[in-house]
Image: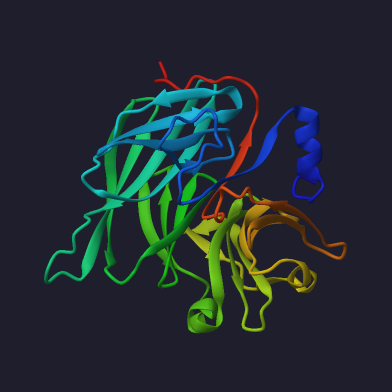
Amino acid sequence: MIYESSFMPLFCRRSRMLSGFFIQDIVDNKFFSILPDNMKILASCNHGILCCVKRSGKNYRYYVCKPATQQLQPLPNPKLRYETVSVAVMVLGSDPFRYKIVRISRQGVKEPMKEYYTYRCEIFDSKTWRWREVERIKVRYSELIIDSVTANNVVCWLTNEDNVIAFREANELLYKFSLPEKVVEKSDLYKCKRLVEYKGRLGLTLLTEDGKMALWPTRGGQTNGMMEWIREEIVIDTENLEKHVQYHSLAGFYNAGIGFLKGFREVVFYRFGNDDSLSRVELDHKLRDARDVFQFRSDLEPVRLGRVS
């Protein structure tokens, strides 16, 4: 029942939970009253907290915050001499409240005569209150990280060469695996590839050659620590959506039955299925587009964001 499209809105009303998405443009805005000026969201999670960075001239400071309770906590900085590629945040416990931040960085200048970037994986643990490097992985210069998602405490980054770089928190392992074989073989025919969380597991969404939306979930278990794609794709009929939303792209799932899509100057909640329906939200004129989308779910209880004692 938890994955039925009607479950999450009803659950949030009854339990006083907040659930939705933060939208961030490339241009600074003042929509988040808790965040100081020049603050940028880097990552979110479904346990109520955001990881942010504040810029002051040439200086940067990392923060974690819980918007629902107006809490803001400065953090030690990682090694900022390396270019930040992506950041993720995950909550590991509620009593005491414990979280980890995962940062992927790389050397910003291409080294002559070398064919690979070295990506560094750093972890901030609220228990130890420090950053430490845990893993490195080499990736070809032509292979770029596109987006990321966290599912079951595994952070996954999609690359433009149909691979996934994954970091598993349980054993602090950084590894790489490919997209489904069918997708790789016909890569040019599949558009708008994106990693998503679907029913608590990693999934891949894309547009098929005939313009339909398809979802490839992973299995619940893993083989040799690796994620395994389910053989058959789930095709989502979006014929009705095409009639009402221009230039749409899937940004994530509100739950298993409701997708969250970016459109032209709007975002859309779209209920899949026989009774498909949609709810549109027009973007404020100060938002040029929904450049960055961060899924968010939170209760209204204060937590200890400082060091776990």
Q: Quick one: 66 or 262, which is closer to the camera?
A: 262
Quadrant (top left/top right/bottom left/bottom right) for the C terminus: top left
Tell me if residue 269 can be seen: yes
Report which quarter residue 158 is drawn in: bottom left
Q: Where does the image place residue 77, in percent across and percent down from the top left?
A: 29, 33
Q: Position of residue 283 (x, y in %)?
A: 64, 51
What residue is shown at x 82% (from left), y 64% (from top)?
Answer: 273
Eyeballing the image, is 251 above or below 130? Answer: below
| Residue at 62 percent of width and 21 percent of height | 301
Outermost residue toward the left in this view? 113
Residue 224 can be seen in this image? no
Taking 192 as reference, is 44 above or below it? above
Q: Seen from this angle, which residue lies furthest right?
A: 275
Q: In this view, does 37 lie to the left or right of 3?
A: left
Left or right of 169 on screen, residue 97:
right
Which of the colour schemes (rainbow, by chain, secondary structure, one colour) is used? rainbow
Q: Residue 64: x and y, percent?
A: 44, 31
Nearest to the observer: residue 141 or residue 24: 24
Vertically, is 204 above or below 8? below
Residue 131 as seen in the image, left or right of residue 162 = left
Residue 175 drawn above or below residue 54: below
- Residue drawn at the location 27% of the way across and 69% of the way down: 141
Residue lying at the far top of the rendered structure = 309
Residue 110 locus on image (x, y percent): 18, 64
Residue 111, picture quadrant: bottom left
Q: Residue at x 79, y 33 (%)?
A: 13
Of residues 239 and 129, the one nearer the viewer is 239
Number of numbered labels in the structure image: 0
Q: In which quarter of the image is residue 108?
A: bottom left
